[in-house]
Image (cartoon, rainbow, N blue to C red):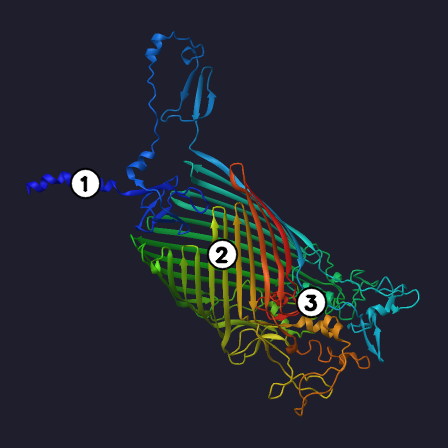
Amino acid sequence: MKKVYLLLPVFAVQFAFSQDSQRYFSGTFYNEKKKPQNFLKIFNKNKGVYELTDEKGFAIIQADVNDTLVWNNGKNIQVVYGVYELKNILERQIKRKSVENISSKDYDNLIKKPKADEFSIEKSYDSLRKSPGYTISAVRKLKLKSDSTYKLKKQPEKFLVFNGSFSTSLDIKNRNRIPQTQNRYVQGRSENGSLVWKGPETGEMFSFGPDISMLGYSGQPYEYDINGQLVNVSNGIFPAKAYNNNLFKTTVGYSNQLNVNAIIKSGGYNEDARLSLSIGQQKDQMYFVDQFDIVNSFKAKFSTEILKFKINAGFNYEENKATNTNRIGLFNRAYQNSLLTPISFSNQQNAYLSNGLQRSYGLLADNPEFIFMQENKYNYYENVRQLNFDVSRQWRGFKFNISQAYDNQNVMHRDVYQISTTGFQNGLYNIRNQKNEFYNSNISASYELQGRHLKNKFGLNHILNDRKIDVSHSLDRNYFYQRTSQDYIFNYNLDYDNYNDIEFGVNLGNSFYVSNTSLKNNYWLPKVNGYFTFKDIFGWNNTDFQVLGAYTQLAAEPEISKSYSSYTTTQFSAQDSRFYFPLKEVETFKNLTNINVKEWKTGFKFMINYKMNLTAEYFDRKIEDDVFPLFENQNLVLKNLANHTYKGYEVNFNYDNIYRRYDFAIGSKVSFFKYRDIVNRINSGYNNLMISGFNDIYKTLSEGQVLGAVVGSYYQRNADGKVIIDDNGYPIKASGTKIIADPTPDFVMKFSHNITYKMFALDINWEWKKGGQVWNGTQTVLDYYGRSKASGDERNIKNYVFEGVNSNGNVNQIPVDFYNPNQSVSENRWTRYGFHGVAENYVQKSDYVRINDITFSAYFDVGKFRRALGVSFYVNNIFLWQANNGVDSDQNFYDFDNSRGLDFFNLPSFKTYGCTVSFKF
């Protein structure tokens, strides 16, 4: 044993040398904004060790050559090349100086004759005094206290910093595609075998008159036209030219935003307090002349830390003013009449007749110029005031947070139709006021237990929402809604990561939902989420495969601040849409069962080298007791009516760095989305309910069908599906209605591309929608009145034979003329089936390819500020191809939610050309 003890010093020396032989890598690490960051976690994937950076972003981590370091959650990686012993790294951190000559004041005094300093303190009667108890490293202030005494004040450790940013943008807008109209035939119809022009005073609505090149203006006084009435071309009468009644203009809007921050810092890095102020103004000009809205905003935020409690408070104020909104379909009415106006009538000449009534082209027509006339500059006002307060504290693994928020909103719509407006001959004036008061409280607590590989987290949330809505119409009664709801949410998270092979996590929880407007509260709303990640599969570094799954139950109620008055359109036919005016609001939100949602999700994620990833997800969402509006006894009510299942899948492929060099990079992203929403069950007596549209063409709630399938008129067919032709040679319109269109697309694909070069960046986003159908009611009405391009191009077609069979089953052989002047105008190809024809005939595909936006940006360094000046040029909706001949199929019917699939003079989308300039200071 003695011999063993004698060898211990030798083993100790060998152990010390073996420890010192380990290699380390050192350097400064940067966050995602390319700035040194303290407490960044640097992970060595090969050795499974990690280190945290110091306050200057510096870290030393054990590594060998070709080891891979990862930080910023895997967004930054580096392969190690230079490694050293720890002693060498530490020695390099100490600045070395060469030995200087030693100087001695005594020796200098012996060889040099001292010079007298007449300005020295020793010979002065003045004295300096500093506050006791601390030393002065930097002088901030020198103050004379008496004739010979000065006081020094040191530079404080805390200081005030100001910074901020300013941005301004300019938008140029123009409308996107609209239906084509004919520019050849004037207002009128056939009479006694001839085509006759009939003026506005006759009440004529059709444009089935003669060719404008055969007519000229008389030049005689005529109240409806300053050029006179239309007469046949003769000596002295020149052919008339078509009037342009385009309602759309190229408009310009702007936006300005100023942000200022005042920060109290200590120690150079820590923020003791921050005050942020933001002031903005935006003018959004519509493509209609003199129609715009202005938004003024002010925001203030304050954050600090008191006794280790983090405190955040904020105040937001926003004011929105608009000339008009589309709440009553005002813009749709103007757009409809601009398209239907005959080429022989000019809306711009005058909006009023000499008697003060509206000057329009027909008895049932409106002049858009007249519609937009208004006494008040703004018919819409909105004020929003928001207060929020947040306080949080953390004790090691325990975290506690309280958030409070209060919103006060006042919204006013002034809806006006002047005397002689079609459908409202006596005029109409209504003011709709809505006051919203929202209070939200969120109290959360969590506790985290963290080991080397395993992390457990327990959480509890209590959410309180109190909402009060007060709605009043000057032409109707007041409506008041109040809801107080509470959510109690319990959560448990388990995460495991061994930094080498696997990583997995599980989230378990349950929620309670309690509300005073619900018939039954929910106390069992479980959720289970989980994922499992295989790291470095197939032995490939940074190649991970993750599988995931989730099950969630939710309880919800209809939003009480939302108005359902737009459902009033279902009270009218498409031809009577001019009478539409939404006054009725929902009677109550009480006595409804909660909308219960059960959702399953499963999928996977495949990641390669932190640059390329493929994700796929399948979802199946069952919605039970969903709520829909309907009219009962002339009152608008809500009812739990149906169950439906919304399911589909989504695939995303992302390649961040297809090509990358020091100052050049290319990236792309592709997503694929497909879904179906099928109605499973409907309460007895409510099958085939109208949920949007008019009462003769609408979206329906029908059992076994897609939610929102379109119902309308159709052609009569025999058992073989062939169209039956009548004795006059035209297809027969069947009695009743049926489902004629499915708005659901087969799939939607979106593409995003990004190119960066030094300070420049180019982003392109576009999408492709395949499948889906839309009822083009706009085309229907344009055909009916003879204003469509098709009716202009085809009205002279003769001896046309429609494909189909007669009542005996024989192939049709009866020729027809599309427009025969010897027949009544109501018997031609486009008018014989009524105002909206045969709806089935106007179902069109809604496929499209669009470039959503292209943005070119440049950032410049200004002085000490990196990328302080930014300039962006962008275009939106610059390209749109679609299968149908109407407006953008993504536009909504009367701007209502959940109304796609119906196009009845839907407003066109718009192209935007813009520039944004931003500056940081």
Estimate how packed mark 2 is, as few (under 14), some (14 to 19) or many (20 or more) residues with alpha carbons within 10 Å. Answer: some
Task: Write the residue at 32% across / 11% down.
Answer: 107
Q: Which x, y percent locates residue 881? A: 62, 65
In terms of depth relative to the viewer, which is nearer, 649 or 797? 797
* Circle 3/circle 2 CB separation < 8 Å: no
Q: How many marks?
A: 3
Q: Which residue, given by chain and number where applicable, does mark 1 sit on? A: 14
Q: Nearer the viewer, mark 2 or mark 1?
A: 1
506 lies left or right of 818: left
What amino acid is found at the position of numbered circle 3 in the picture? Answer: Pro
297 lies left or right of 554: right
Estimate how packed mark 1 is, as few (under 14), some (14 to 19) or many (20 or more) residues with alpha carbons within 10 Å. Answer: few
Q: Which x, y percent locates residue 467? A: 51, 60
| Disc 1 element | helix
Q: Which residue, given by chain and number where applicable, does mark 3 sit on? A: 179
Q: CA distance from mark 2 to mark 1?
A: 70 Å
Estimate how packed mark 3 is, as few (under 14), some (14 to 19) or many (20 or more) residues with alpha carbons within 10 Å. Answer: some
| Disc 3 element | loop
